[in-house]
Image (tube, grey):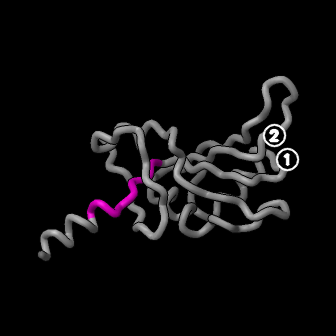
Amino acid sequence: QQQQQQQQQHNDVVRVGRRVYVGNLAWSTSWQDLKDFFRRAGNVVYASVMTEEDTGRSKGCGIVEFETSEEAVKAIETMHDAELDGRKVTVREDREDRDLKTSSGASGRYPSRGNKRVRSAHRP
């Protein structure tokens, strides 16, 4: 039974790469604002606010990449629902992260975070 419990705990872990998706951004939030804000969680190596191709207007979301997956986990755990430019932002794993897709034979579907533990992805 202990082995079954350990297997269940292993199944309840969500692996996270180095990138996080940030939603509910104010239209005025720039990539530099995003980078500065997420420095609390670790060393930010890339930050981008997604924009409409034809107008250049913000889509209200962005991507932040950290130096390590542990920093990305910290950002998810500590900065989800934090306020940036007057709005509570959503922070979750980036489902498009190549590191995530290639770790341990991932199938391309990722469970929601829910009440599950979060662990950084194994890296080759």
Image check: 12 left or right of 41?
A: left
Residues shaded magenta = 10-17
Tell me if mark 1 has few (under 14), some (14-19) or many (20+) residues whose alpha carbon lies within 10 angstroms of its own. Answer: some
Residue 66 position, x and y percent, is 54, 50
Image check: 20 left or right of 124?
A: right
Q: Is residue 89 above or below residue 78?
A: above
Q: State the mark number for residue 81.
A: none
Q: Is residue 120 above or below residue 106?
A: below
Residue 71 position, x and y percent, is 50, 59
The N terminus: image quadrant: bottom left
Residue 74 position, x and y percent, is 52, 64
Callout 2: helix, strand or loop?
Answer: strand
Callout 1: helix, strand or loop?
Answer: loop
Q: Residue furthest bottom?
A: 2
Which residue corresponds to the image point at 39% horizontal and 57% vertical from the top-left? 14
Please say whether residue 19 is one of the residues in the magenta stretch: no
Residue hosting label 2: 58
Residue 28 position, x and y percent, is 87, 48
Please say whether residue 12 is one of the residues in the magenta stretch: yes
Disc on the earlier residue, 1 or 2? 1
Question: Which amino acid, mark 2?
Answer: Ser
Name the quadrant containing residue 9.
bottom left
Cα separation, mark 1 vs mark 2, equals 5 Å
Q: Is residue 64 above or below residue 75?
A: above
Q: State the mark number for residue 27.
A: 1
Which residue corresponds to the image point at 70% horizontal and 68% vertical from the top-left? 82
Question: Which amino acid, mark 1?
Answer: Trp
The C terminus: image quadrant: top left
Tell me if mark 2 has few (under 14), some (14-19) or many (20+) residues whose alpha carbon lies within 10 angstroms of its own. Answer: some
Name the quadrant containing residue 36.
bottom right
Label pair 1/2, CB-CB below 8 angstroms: yes
